[in-house]
Amino acid sequence: MTKEPPRKTIYRLSIYQRCLSRLRANSVDTVSSEALAKAAGVKPTQLRKDLAYFGQFGTRGIGYSVSMLSNFLDDVLGTTKLQPVILIGVGNLGAALLRYDGFRKEGFEITAAFDLAPESANARNVPFAIRAAKEMPVYVREHHVKMAILAIPSNSAQSVVNEAVDAGIQAILNFSPTVLQVPSHVIVNSVDLAVELENLSYFIR
């Protein structure tokens, strides 16, 4: 790797990997940069620039080996084995995320879920027992979990994140409608559903 790639590049690597997975499922052996870029919704120059952060790929006139590039991206993205993830907050959204079976297909596994009211959460028809929120820091330390999904109200999000980070969490997918303050070594990707819908509304005039 020549230098640290931007976060947007890492995000696009995941998109490229989805496209490569579909090609592998259809028994496609090679793909040109133009075809892969079109499938990913980017320009070929952007695709080649993103991959150049990690080395030289492909053969002129032939393209990329689908299996080799896919395996390489698996390694870069850390999905060569199931990555453990915890879920914090098992309300309606959290319960829906627990029932979603697509995470394992992409290399992630929710191994534990925590809630302030585990008895109520367990009544939501979720696939495994919900733990009390106070157990979260100990679980993270004992199982060396580095990733968390946050689906709790904004008024308690920061304090919960502080505990999670102190326990060893380094990456957070945040569904709470608030801006989280974290140390520089911790990555937060926030998903504000209301903002996303507002953005979409611009295009339906």
Image (cartoon, rainbow, N blue to C red):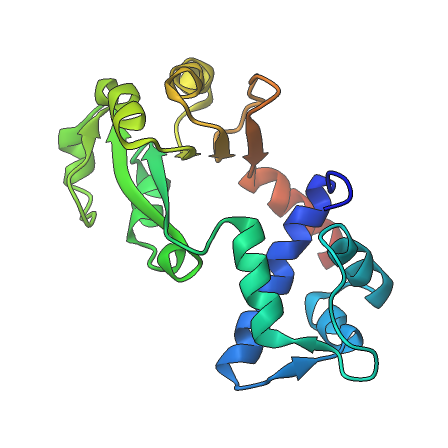
| Of residues 28 and 135, the one drawn nearer to the viewer in this rendering | 28
Instruction: Examine the rendering and report whether any part of residue 134 can be seen.
Output: yes
| Of residues 27 and 123, the one drawn nearer to the viewer in this rendering | 27
Picture quarter containing residue 180? top right
Extreme-right residue of the structure: 45
Residue displayed at 54% across by 41% down: 193
Q: Is residue 185 left or right of residue 43?
A: left
Picture quarter containing residue 143? top left
Q: Is residue 92 left or right of residue 53?
A: left
Instruction: Examine the rendering and report whether any part of residue 19 can be seen.
Output: no
Picture quarter containing residue 142? top left
Residue displayed at 19% across by 30% down: 131
Residue displayed at 57% across by 17% down: 183
Quadrant in which the C terminus appears: bottom right
Q: Position of residue 182 (x, y in %)?
A: 55, 18
Against 15, residue 119 (above or below) is: above
Q: Position of residue 29 (x, y in %)?
A: 60, 84
Against 181, residue 33 (above or below) is: below
Q: Position of residue 55 (x, y in %)?
A: 74, 56
Against 185, residue 16 (above or below) is: below
- What count of labels does the image hold? 0
Residue displayed at 69% across by 40% down: 7
Q: Is residue 125 left or right of residue 53?
A: left
